Image (tube, rainbow, N blue to C red):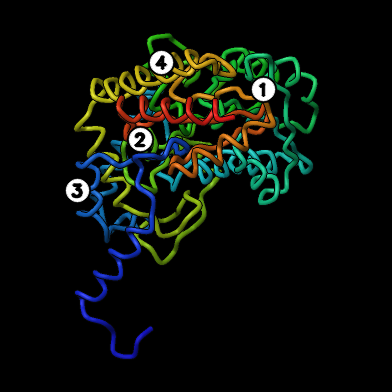
Amino acid sequence: MEEGGMSKEAVESLLQEKKLEDLSYERILSSMCTYPHEIAVYAHAMFLESNLGDSGLFPGTKEMENKVIRMIGALLGKEDAAGYISTGGTESNIQAIRAIRNRKRKEGLRDMNIIVPESAHFSFDKIADLLSIEVRKASLDEELRMDVNSVERLIDDQTIGVVGIAGTTEFGQIDPIKELSEIIMERDLFLFVDAAFGGFVIPFLEERYEFDFSLEGVRAISVDPHKMGMSTIPAGCLLFSEESYLEELAVPTPYLTTKEQCSLTGTRSGASAAATYAVLKYLGREGLKRIVGECMRLTRILVSGAKQIGISPVIEPVMNVVALRFPETEVGRVTRALGERRWRVSVTRKPKALRLVIMPHVDEETIHLFLEELEDIVYVV
């Protein structure tokens, strides 16, 4: 830090320099984030100083958060769901499991476990460490969905909950949430649906899927507005079927304007809540449906083009996530070659495949250019 500081112009120059070092989204096909909608950017800037951790000072921002919870709750089958705007899927996942862990602790249970699919996000490895509970991983079926038979074999007297994924990070697959709900209801367990990506996609797909609060067994859902919801980073959302689960997370806040706080973070961005409120009000369901529809159209173009050059998907895409199958020894070479041409893609774990996410920043010209370069790379001798 300079003793006397720098001029505004000098700082702006430094910022521009660093911005140029960042990648732009145009050739990024590996990210589940995208450019936020311009109305979200406008709202975010307007509410930069608001802190929902002390929401009595910012009642207008708090009212927007409450309305966002109702809007997303209604989208996911329960308008009166309880929850808050989090920093994203990782925080939401931690808090959902923490809520049921805290409840079971009060009931006297000490050694606990939850069951997640092998395809679960890596945040559940953090949860095992942070919450000191065992995370058991159920196997997947041929369609890379959570195997319900594997789940039933893993359940024991220390099991407190099961996690199903609605839009897996690597393959975009939807676990059999309805079947999981039936298992949960028989055993009085906690069913949490990680819909961080799929929550703003699945309701707008042509095919109908049962995955949300319309299923009686679903107790909590996470969804990220900063992904397909077109909001600014960081904007996640955690919803519970009952207010009582949120109360399991409450701690007293004696020197703030509120009596207690349920979020994991103390200071909490009101800007993210405002951005999410603005973009949901602006786009409405029809606007979100158009965005998802365009992403799915481009996904179909990508898959069709890949098949024409002899590359098939690991599974037929359920949503705008594609995993292209290559011989395992070829995946690394193809990924490196694409990187040399400034494409950013990623690789799945099992089975190993080239992973592509078709977000709103991707257009048809980009898809065709990518396919041309992919074909060139694949057939290089």
Q: Mark 1 packing: few (<14 Cα in 10 Å), some, or many (20+)? A: few
Is 233 left, or right, of 174 in this rendering?
Answer: left
**Mark 2 — residue?**
69
> Could you tell me if residue 125 is visible in this image?
yes
Q: Nearer the viewer, mark 3 or mark 2?
A: 3
> Identity of the amino acid at label 3?
Tyr
Res 333 → quadrant: top right
- CA gap, disc 1 and disc 3: 45 Å
Note whether 149 is above or below 7 in the view shown.
above
Is 247 left, or right, of 36 in this rendering?
Answer: right
Q: Earlier in the sequence, mark 4 or mark 1?
A: 1
Image coordinates for residue 57, horizontal then vertical, percent: 27, 59
Q: Earlier in the sequence, mark 2 or mark 4?
A: 2
> Identity of the amino acid at label 1?
Asp
Q: Mark 4 packing: few (<14 Cα in 10 Å), some, or many (20+)? A: some
SS at mark 1 in the image: loop
Quarter of the image where the C terminus is located: top right
Q: Earlier in the sequence, mark 1 or mark 2?
A: 2
Is 118 left, or right, of 198 in this rendering?
Answer: right
Q: Mark 3 packing: few (<14 Cα in 10 Å), some, or many (20+)? A: some
**Mark 3 — residue?**
42
Quarter of the image where the N terminus is located: bottom left
Q: Earlier in the sequence, mark 3 or mark 2?
A: 3
Verify CB contact (< 8 Å) between mark 1 and mark 3: no
Note whether 102 is above or below 289 in the view shown.
below
Name the mark on residue 188: 1
- CA gap, disc 3 and disc 2: 20 Å
Name the mark on residue 300: 4
SS at mark 4 in the image: helix
Image coordinates for residue 251, horizontal then vertical, percent: 52, 54
Q: Nearer the viewer, mark 1 or mark 2?
A: 2
> Identity of the amino acid at label 4?
Arg
